[in-house]
Image (cartoon, rainbow, N blue to C red):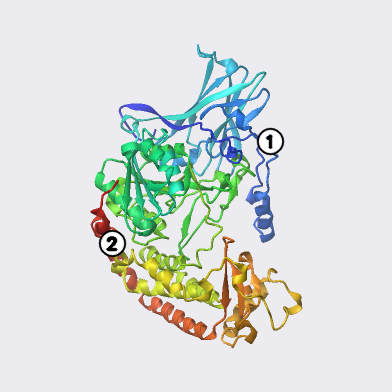
Amino acid sequence: MSEQSSTTARRLLQRQILPLDGDVDVLPLYLDAEEANLDEDKYVVGGSRAAKELNNASIRQKTSTGRGVRPDQVRSRTAVLIPSGEKLSFGTYFNAFPASYWRRWSIVDAVRLTVTLRGEGATVIVTKSMANGRQQKVEAASTDDVAAGPDGLHVLTFDLSLAPFVDGGWYWYDVVAGHGDVVVESAEWSAEVPAERARPGTLDIAITTMNRPDFCADLLAQLGGGELDDVLDTVFVMEQGTNKVADGPGFAAAEKALGERLRLIEQGNLGGSGGYARGQLESLRKGTATYTMMMDDDVVAEPDGIVRAVTFADLARRPTIVGGHMFSLFSRSRLHSFGEIIQPYRFWWMSPKDAYNDWDFGARNLRSARWLHKRQDVDFNGWFMCLVPRRVIDEIGLSLPLFIKWDDSEYGLRARAAGYPTVTFPGAAVWHVPWTDKNDSLDWQAYFHQRNRYIAALLHSGYPRGGGLLKESLAHDLAHLVSMQYSTVELRLQALEDVLAGPQGLHAMLPTRLAEVNAFRRGFTDAQLHRDPDALPPVRREKPPRKGRDSSEVPGRLAKMVTAGLAPVRHLKNPRALSREFPEAEVRAMDAKWYRLATYDSAVVSMNDGTSAALYRRDPEKYRELVRRTIALHARYRREWSELAGAYRAALGDITSPEVWEQTFAPWTDEDAR
């Protein structure tokens, strides 16, 4: 224990947990019956391009043999049966102990593992890993060495240091059943902590919802299921839709489960940032909870992960934002990202270069994936599940009034600048409807992506004129233009113009900007979506494709460079006559890359979600206009960046203050809150 205290108490840090829904897809996150098959070290493979490609393929290679745990082996929320002669590892996402995170960010320097078993001849093996994934046996003990208590249970205890986990690494335990079946009844990781930190902090949960009554009611029922009773203070639901959660069939049960801890607050559609800011404000004004957790309405929670986030925050060295991971709701062993950063020069969110997105623990579990053992330090955590200490909110303010996009990442950067880190904590997670099947950089959200990225960069970029942001932004506009995505470019340019207007108008436009953006887009054919394939003209071409090339062929690097040079010029020319009446091709969403669309004068392009398609049609006059506007706007940003950044930074404290947000909420604060 690294914090001095005259008295200490033992506190539970993490317990063994198991799923009860019988879903075999989720079992690999809790239990692993496979043998570990660690991938090759990158320093052994080498640094050449070919070696890296080989290493990437090796890392992604499936190691699962299909040997799994049967759902009927799970006996309770904490107990699992291991048949005679079999071995089961708890070196998994939810049951391994993330030692390096506790070592780096908390006051804990040693832990105790207590495993309770029923059955004779069972062996518990404790293993640790290092940051490079290499694994070492630490200690082993058998139930034969410890007499059973009156209840027939054997209790094995292991005291473990956190000293060797500076850069990464986990602890976990495997259990081998001997000559008879064994039940692992429970396992707990605990530590001696200062007595004043032994009592758990309390938590308000802020959920922004809009027209998802079933999802939201199910989540509320989960939160009221009993596992959070020791930490849950209030659940604030910011109702911003017309299809209200209170009118759904599942709400009565959720309301009964939460009782007086549930508060429904109705307000206009102020986006995610407006909903979460309202929750932050209500939590701050109430002043009874230690933390506020932002949570999406369309998630399935692992309640114990919420408890773990609170526990970790309670024992952090300094006030710390603690976020969770996001797994896919449709493929439940797939992890979206292990941690996210803002690439400082591009000023764009991303996973670190040595991490892998969309990782399937069912194909290659924790013990077999070397990269998962290096601690991932982050700049922010998405607000699908993110705990913020009330002290931090009180000091740095509420969310920026951004509607959607960049509110969570900007907040992480703002907190870091004030001395408060963010930790994306393994073992705390939700399952979320994945957004990877959508392309929100093209639709109405393009406006908020562009505007809010610029605002965040003006506030936090350390590079003159935002580093590479302006160059990349201009290149993206040109790529959209040669792709005939005129509505997208119009929205991106409107976003830049709104940023130039200054920070003081952000609150005023919060309730209205979405409707204005959607109304504006309706005039563009590339924004008009058609679900019926017969609603669009059939494909006809004046000439067949050159040498019969298929639209799905991927050009080489040289061909892409040639297209990048010629396409902007080609789009100044008049289009082929037949293309005014008939599209020249049907392009699947996965093939709708700029270098492919740039070769057509018109095309039917399907959307990423697979439900509709739009007609793209080349317009040289509109193209010329938008090229001129984007060049002029980006040139203006280069001239005025420093002055604009100063204005936004000077206004930050005001526009994120509770007092200014209260004025924004004023139209709804006089209404009754249920």
Q: Secondary structure at mark 2?
A: helix
Residue under label 2, please give it: 655
Residue 665, labelled with which disc? Answer: none
* Horizontal and vertical percent position of residue 176: 63, 25
Camera sees residue 8: yes
Q: Earlier in the sequence, mark 2 or mark 1?
A: 1
Horizontal placement of 535 versus 274: left or right? right
Q: CA distance from mark 2 to mark 1?
A: 55 Å
Residue at 60 percent of width and 37 percent of height: 135
Residue at left offset 49%, top offset 30%:
160
Label 1, secondary structure: give it.
loop
Is 225 positioned to the left or the right of 371 in the image? left
Other residues around mark 2 within 10 Å, as few (<14) / some (14–19) / many (≥20): many
x, y (%) of residue 188? 48, 28
Instruction: Say which quadrant the N terminus sits in.
Output: top left
Give whichever of 178, 27 is nearer the camera: 27
Q: Nearer the viewer, residue 398 or 38?
A: 398
Question: Which residue is at 67% across, 27% downward?
Answer: 86
Identified by mark 2, the residue type is: Ile
Position of residue 98 relative to residue 52, above or below, is above
Image quadrant assignment for residue 494: bottom left
222 lies left or right of 607: left
Amino acid tagged 1: Arg
Q: Residues within 10 Å of mark 1 (few under 14, many from 20)?
A: few
- List x then y, in percent, for residue 265: 31, 50
**Callout count:** 2
Residue pointed to by mark 1: 67
The vertical placement of 502 against 132, above or below, is below
**547 in relation to 141, above or below:** below
Can you say whether 79 is above or below 302 in the image? above
Nearest the viewer among 336 and 14 is 336
